[in-house]
């Protein structure tokens, strides 16, 4: 009788252990589901923000330019009996058309720079650094490991976007005079860093703001990096500049080439 009681107690302990493991697994699945929902929402917010920005640029830039072009062409047509005035209107229309073409090409590069597809990530980063310097008169240092590591297409796009959006944040918030960009390979990890000498900020507050959904910038970057199995750090202090650092595991194909 005593043996039966011991066996039942042991069985009950095993059942309790299995139930505890089951509850733990359910809790973990619920937490994972919540995290993936937050991740999906964050990515969605980033996409919507990009669409909103593109719509605004098209409306305010290209849309206004085309409206002015139509107006000038109508004025030129009305002035055909006055050749000098007509030529002046057509010259202005040509200038507007040239400006519109440049704006359209700039928007195209913003959406997807052709150089990234044609010449690869290294050339695209060098182009981005030159454009940033030319457009904003901020010194840019670029340090890229040589020979340049083999990086598959989607990861190359992500590295370019992290760099591009970090530079955009620097323009909006940092008031920096210099930016240093570095892309290095260490074993099977790629490390990207973008460091500026600007006014800095409270890093915890900035990331907290992103986590709460009031900003899609840093939180969106971090979530997209996580989608590729990477990690992103944001180090900043008031009046001491800031550094965005991202690490990415290299693809299996790249690992094979290096092995």
Image (spheres, grey):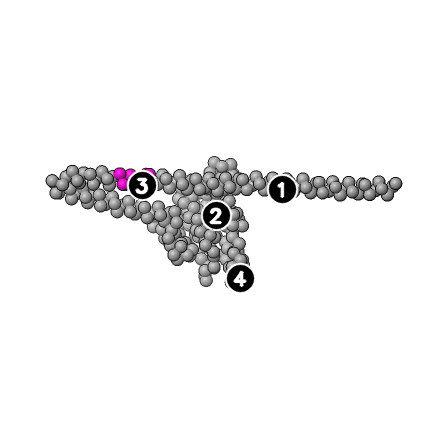
On screen, 257 above or below 32? below
Residue with the mark numbered 4: 256
The Cα atoms of the two marked residues, 1 and 4, are separated by 34 Å
In this rendering, the label closer to the viewer, 3 or 1: 1
The Cα atoms of the two marked residues, 2 and 4, are separated by 29 Å
Residue with the mark numbered 3: 61
Q: Are marks 2 and 1 in contact (CB under 8 Å)?
A: no
- Helix, strand or loop under label 3: helix
Residue 28 circle label: 1
In this rendering, the label closer to the viewer, 2 or 1: 1
| Residue 53 sits inside the magenta stretch | no
The Cα atoms of the two marked residues, 3 and 2, are separated by 31 Å
The Cα atoms of the two marked residues, 3 and 1, are separated by 49 Å
In this rendering, the label closer to the viewer, 2 or 4: 4
Inspect this view and state whether residue 197 appears.
Answer: no
Residue 77 circle label: none
The quadrant the N terminus occupies is top right
| Earlier residue among tags 2 and 1 | 1
């Amino acid at each position: 009788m005593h043996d039966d009681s011991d066996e039942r107690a042991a069985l009950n302990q095993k059942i309790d252990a299995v139930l505890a493991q089951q509850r733990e697994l359910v809790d973990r699945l619920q937490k994972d589901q919540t995290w993936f929902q937050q991740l999906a929402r964050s990515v969605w917010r980033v996409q919507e923000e990009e669409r909103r920005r593109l719509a605004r640029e098209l409306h305010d830039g290209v849309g206004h330019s085309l409206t002015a072009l139509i107006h000038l062409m109508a004025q030129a047509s009305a002035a055909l009996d006055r050749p000098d005035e007509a030529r002046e209107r057509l010259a202005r229309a040509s200038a507007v058309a040239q400006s519109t073409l440049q704006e359209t090409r700039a928007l195209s590069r913003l959406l997807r720079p052709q150089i990234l597809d044609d010449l690869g990530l290294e050339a695209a980063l060098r182009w981005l650094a030159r454009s940033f310097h030319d457009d904003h008169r901020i010194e840019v240092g670029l340090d890229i490991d040589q020979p340049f590591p083999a990086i598959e297409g989607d990861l190359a796009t992500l590295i370019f976007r992290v760099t591009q959006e970090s530079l955009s944040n620097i323009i909006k918030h940092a008031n920096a005079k210099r930016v240093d960009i570095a892309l290095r390979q260490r074993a099977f990890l790629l490390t990207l860093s973008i460091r500026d000498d600007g006014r800095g900020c409270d890093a915890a507050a900035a990331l907290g703001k992103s986590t709460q959904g009031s900003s899609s910038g840093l939180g969106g970057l971090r979530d997209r990096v996580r989608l590729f199995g990477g990690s992103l750090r944001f180090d900043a202090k008031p009046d001491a500049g800031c550094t965005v650092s991202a690490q990415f595991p290299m693809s299996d194909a790249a690992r094979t080439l290096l092995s």
